[in-house]
Image (spheres, rainbow, N blue to C red):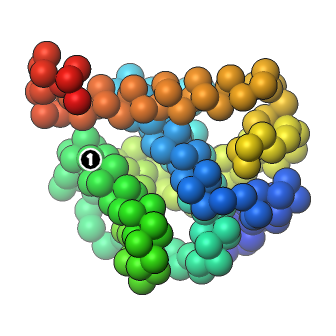
Amino acid sequence: MDKLIEMVKDWAKERGLDKVDARTQYTKLIEEQGELAKAIMQKNVDGDSGVLDSLGDYQVTLIIYCLIRDIHIAFWKTVINPKDFATETIYMNLVSTSSKIIANYNKGLVTNEIRSIETTFQLLSLIAGKYDTTLEDTLELAYNEIKNRKGKLVNGVFIKEDDFTGTQGYERGFEDGKNHVFELIKNKFDLGRKSNEL
């Protein structure tokens, strides 16, 4: 796993992603969080933008966030049985915990920020376990997909060459991800019509 993390870091450095603002990188993480919600909702496990892809991409964005923040990532195997929890419950905890990353960053609470990152990785590991895979396997999938990817930075966000039409690809991805997170929350808590007012 350590070797994979270093390969992702090297990939990010080659593209200047280690120099972007942490908040900008965090928006990319939220986009991937939305993709994961969409995959879970659609029961898309190993298809294009499926759960396995999304878990790997989520890790890549979080590793780059840690690179920007100079935070060392320690990986461990979770001792909690993922089968004891519903996937949606784990995901909702993931949304809550990952939001604390940027909240703690904004407050300058580095220890809490690190704790939130560690918990986020644990929750990702639980989701991986629900689909009989691991963080290492899904990170390797993601790395193999991005390792030769070309693109460029636009306002601190890496836009892959295939999606590059100004910043429209990024903005569409972020908006799409946000909508899928909201839909999962709405379904989980049965917010009904009042949810549109949020």
Q: Is residue 167 left or right of residue 125?
A: right
**Where does the image place residue 90, in percent across and percent down from the top left?**
27, 51
Q: Which residue is mark 1?
A: 92
Which amino acid type is shown beneath numbered disc 1? Met
Q: Quadrant of the N terminus?
A: bottom right
Secondary structure at badge 1 equals: helix
Q: Is residue 14 visible?
A: yes
Towards the viewer: 87 or 177: 177
**Where does the image place residue 52, in percent across and percent down from the top left?**
52, 41
Q: Residues within 10 Å of mark 1 (few under 14, many from 20)?
A: some
Q: Is residue 153 left or right of residue 65?
A: right
Note whether 106 is above or below 17 in the view shown: below
What residue sits 39% from the left and 26% below the top?
A: 179
Which residue is farthest top?
193
Note whether 69 is above or below 154 in the view shown: below
What residue sits 54% from the left and 33% below the top?
A: 174
Q: Quadrant of the C terminus?
A: top left
When asked about the image quadrant of residue 20, the answer is bottom right
